[in-house]
Amino acid sequence: MPTLINQQYRLAARPVGAPRHSDWSFTSEPVRDIADGEIIVQTIYISLDPAMRGWMNEGKSYIRPVAIDEVMRAGGIGKVIASRSTKFKTGDYVCGGTGVQQYWAGAADDKAAAFHKVDPQLAPLPKYLNALGMPGMTAYFGLLDVGQPKAGETVVVSGAAGAVGQTVGQVARQKGCRVVGIAGGQEKCDFVVNELGFDACIDYKAGALREGLKQHCPDGVDIYFDNVGGEILDTVLTCINLKARIIICGAISQYNSTTPVKGPSNYLSLLVNRARMEGIVVFDYAARYGEAVAAMGQWMAQGKFQTREDIVVGIEGFPDALMMLFEGKNFGKLILQMGEE
Ligand SMILES: NC(=O)c1ccc[n+]([C@@H]2O[C@H](COP(=O)([O-])OP(=O)(O)OC[C@H]3O[C@@H](n4cnc5c(N)ncnc54)[C@H](OP(=O)(O)O)[C@@H]3O)[C@@H](O)[C@H]2O)c1
């Protein structure tokens, strides 16, 4: 095989506020030869996730920070182009921790990369980074395991047109719940109602969230799946029912803040309503991912469930593409295409 050149994005500096171009370095190096038990994966798609912003920070979290000068961590899908392992053969498609780079070389059973095979005949590859991947697992287990929805209950989800939000709403519909989304802009709201089958969607940017919640949740809110935190969380807390469940999945409104995270001032609503607020970290459910893939795969095959991806092409666009998440510019699961399928 001719020497392959691997282009990569590495973390150059820890951002203060929103990441800037100077926080990244764009490097290239030859792909090394592999030894017994190793593989080379050519990256095709990587998942751009709000969590990446947290991984750039120093400090204790559910996963170690990306080190300065390290290739940026990213989940991705690629093709095995060389193998000296019995685990994967050349031509296999795999999903795992590829990082923001064109090639990954290492042990086929590398724990951090955690590669597993995916089948492009069963679903288009980008779906494995969306509902059949990490965001889908987050939505499925966050809603069902933490939220414990019952038919007839009202579920509200923020970031409704995004990767996690789309799936939360559709799983809740499958469970017989009334589903109200919160999203930025009429186009996204129309999509979740008309295409995904939510009962209603409130455009929080129009400035009448509280009124919208009163209108579309006449019986109050039983479950709130929170992807955004900040003022939206605070407002939803004023509308919850007795024994409501608030699922803390993320707080994207706070990730680039240079001041302390804004916590909910209406938290005493939890006391009054004997309600519960609980976090979810998707990796805790790794042993059960197959359950979620089977359920959602079946709904997809039956035409009862769909997802939208927003695919940006070219590794060079990584820094700007990542920022789309924080500016509400992505419409569906944001994916960066690094190479041809
Ligand atoms: N706990 C876990 O294990 C886990 C796993 C995966 C993801 N997450 C979290 O889940 C959340 C959603 O992730 P995702 O991958 O599905 O992203 P996404 O919803 O596909 O994309 C992010 C969206 O957030 C919205 N947003 C951005 N800034 C906002 C602000 N200031 N206020 C309100 N909304 C804002 C934008 O939508 P609009 O145009 O609608 O504003 C944007 O399109 C994130 O908080 C992420 O960290 C958690």
Image (cartoon, rainbow, N blue to C red):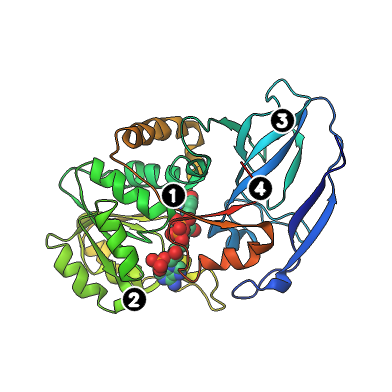
At 60% from the left and 50% from the top, the residue drawn is 46
- Sequence-earlier tag: 1 or 4: 1
In the picture of the structure, the residue carrying the numbered disc 3 is: 108
Q: Secondary structure at mark 2?
A: helix
Q: Earlier in the sequence, mark 1 or mark 2?
A: 2
Could you tell which of marks 2 and 4 lies nearer the N-terminus? 2
Does the beta carbon at disc 2 come under 8 Å from ligand 1?
A: yes
Q: Is mark 1 within 8 Å of ligand 1?
A: yes
On the image, numbered disc 1 is attached to which residue? 280
Report crowding for label 3: few under 14, some 14 to 19, many 20 or more residues within 10 A (C-alpha): many
From the viewer's side, name the closer residue of 76 and 235.
76
What residue appears at the point 64 percent right and 29 percent down from the top-left corner? 92
Disc 4 residue crowd, few under 14, some 14–19, many 20+, Cα 10 Å: some
Relative height, residue 174 to residue 52 (above, below): above
Residue for point 61% across, 68% down: 320
Q: Looking at the rendered structure, which numbered label has been put on residue 60? A: none
Please identify the quadrant where the C terminus is shown.
top right
Q: Which mark is residue 205?
A: 2
Q: Residue 106 location, x and y as percent?
A: 77, 36
